[in-house]
Image (cartoon, grey):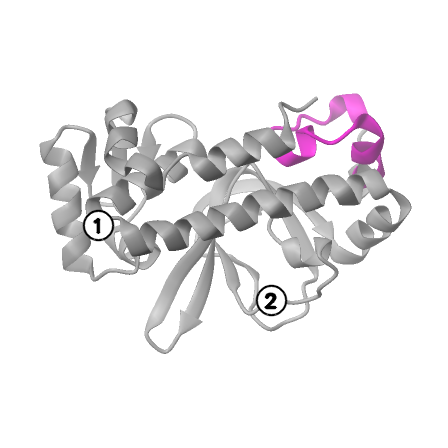
Amino acid sequence: MHPPQQLSITNRLLASLSAEDFASLQPHLEPVPLDIRQVLIEPNTAIAHVYFPEAGMSSVTNNSSGGKIEVGVVGREGMVGLPIVLGIDQTPYEHFMQIAGHGWRLAAPDLEQAMRRSSSLHRHLLRYAQASHVQVSETAFANANSDVEARLARWLLMCHDRVEGDDIPLTHEFIAMMLGVRRPGVTVALHVLEGMQVIRAKRGLITVLDREKLEELADDAYGLSEAEYTRLMGTGR
């Protein structure tokens, strides 16, 4: 494996670990591509690996007879496979790559062993679990209390937080799944935001033109979980 100084880490969760806790994981971290639509964790199946994205974004979805509904997102701020941190070996939710990228893969038994050896590592990952819980709760709040335009603005902001630059490679199909609305409703909401000149939408690509205006449109649907992440996880090494 590479010595510590040769690893370039942009995943914020890994970067926020103490030097000692990161060193306990480093020999087991495997660089992997994360392709679009790649399933990282199957529902109701033993979790073999956890993932720390460096680029790209994973969706956590509830797959029902009515289709997929997103309940959470994970990008370079976190990890895919949180049940392992909680002492659970599977989840009812599917985790797949919505935006392609790359990252680090770690075998679940290696993470479990590292947490048994280091209470500080386990505590830090539990703090991330709390931040993720707040994100999921805020998604439920937004779905219940915000109109489609505000929910779309929130979700685009969450994507924007997890990509480089202002271009977000997304289809209307994906957006409809994320928001839990029909595709025509997504088209109307996108047209509204385009008319306000906060985004530009092309086939398979959305460009953020005015992030400040997006935040105004999202109102209190966006910001609480992001602030909680910063409070719990700190600024990193």
Q: In which quarter of the image is the N terminus?
A: top right
10 to 178, vertically: above or below: above
- The residue shown at (40%, 38%) is 158
Task: Give the spatial CA distance, label 2 vs label 1.
Answer: 29 Å
- The residue shown at (47%, 52%) is 136
**Residue wearing tag 2:** 91
- The residue shown at (14%, 28%) is 197
The amino acid type of the residue labelled 1 equals Val
Task: Give residue 84's mark.
Answer: none
Q: Please state which of the two labelled residues, at mark 2 or mark 1, is closer to the viewer.
A: 1
- The residue shown at (12%, 49%) is 188
Q: Is residue 200 left or right of residue 144?
A: left
Residue 112 drawn in magenta: no
Residue at the farthest right position: 117
Residue 1 in view of the camera: no
Task: State the image coordinates of residue 209 (x, y, percent, origin top left).
Answer: 23, 25
Dot 2 or dot 1, earlier in sequence: 2
Which image quarter: residue 123?
Answer: top right
Q: In which quarter of the image is the C terminus?
A: top right
**Residue wearing tag 1:** 148
The residues colored magenta run 4-25
Judged by its main secondary structure, the magenta piece is helix
Do tag 2 and tag 1 residues touch (Cβ < 8 Å)? no
Q: In this view, does 195 lie to the left or right of 142?
A: left
Q: Which of 116 and 104 is in front in this view?
A: 116
Residue 44 in view of the camera: yes
Task: State the image coordinates of residue 38 (x, y, percent, origin top left).
Answer: 50, 56
The amino acid type of the residue labelled 2 equals Thr
92 to 18, vertically: above or below: below
Residue at the farthest bottom position: 65
Q: Around disc 2, counting alpha carbons within 10 Å, would you say few (fewer than 14), some (14 to 19), or many (20 or more)?
A: some
